[in-house]
Amino acid sequence: MAFTGAGISVESGIPPFRGPGGIWSIYDPEKFEKGYFKRHPEEVWPLLKKIFYDSFGRAKPNAAHLALAELEQADKLAGIVTQNIDSLHQAAGSQVVHEYHGSTRRMQCMQCRTYFDADAISLDTLPPRCPSCGGLLKPDFVFFGEGVASDVHYAATDLAKQSDVCLVIGTGGQVVPAGRIPYIVKNRGGVIIEINLSDTGYTYTTSDYFLEGKAGAMVSKLVRCVLG
């Protein structure tokens, strides 16, 4: 299996959330707390559009996304658990992707709970309203103060329980409970292969192999070694 974070999408032009130049160094994360959003949708929605739809919407899969899709097609990768909400794994052709923190691809009405394809919702007028009942629409990804969907959590942990190798790519596992996924593989005797630009909390406690470098180059090299 693969467990991916923001670092795998940086080469696609999507900035990380944390660290220098990260989204939370530019925007106040408290604005993306669910309660604040419900109280101030007129303030938050322009930020959501700018960050997650105008910016993310232009991103394309990079070599790392494509290499993982190739590995799955060769029956060498059972699936991906990603913390990312950009859906670039699916755009690259990956079929089994558990989006632990949701996705920008869908929106949900906070009143009638109906889901909609984000591409079908106009963002010309903000905040967007539900086509069915006129309620407030929210992107279908996890805000601060909001729990992870139980079905995604169970699917991700089940995949980890069945995997004997976990590729940890572009993440330091700082966000929990997502960051615990590699430990499930490790605790069952599995091997952890970490790919990142620098060492993380996994490197000296959990990873069996640490491949330092950009995700695009390192994942591609690894997949070439596996597939020949």
Image: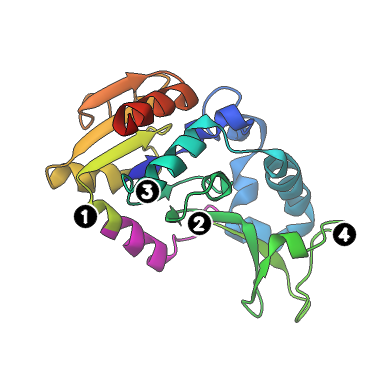
The label on residue 145 is 2
Q: Which residue is mark 4?
A: 125
Label 1 SS: helix
> Badge 1: few (under 14), some or many (20 or more) residues near its Cα, within 10 Å?
some
Label 2 SS: loop
* Foreground disc of the pair 2, 4: 4
Residue type, mark 3 in image: Ala
Give the quadrant of residue 211: top left
Residue type, mark 1 in image: Lys
Left or right: residue 89 versus residue 168 is right
Mark toward the start of the polypeptide (2 vs 3): 2
Residue 69 at x, y = what percent? 46, 43
> Badge 2: few (under 14), some or many (20 or more) residues near its Cα, within 10 Å?
few
Query: In the image, what residue occupies the spot 50% across and 56% down?
Result: 145
Q: How is the image coloured?
A: rainbow
- The question of residue 98 being in magenta is answered with no
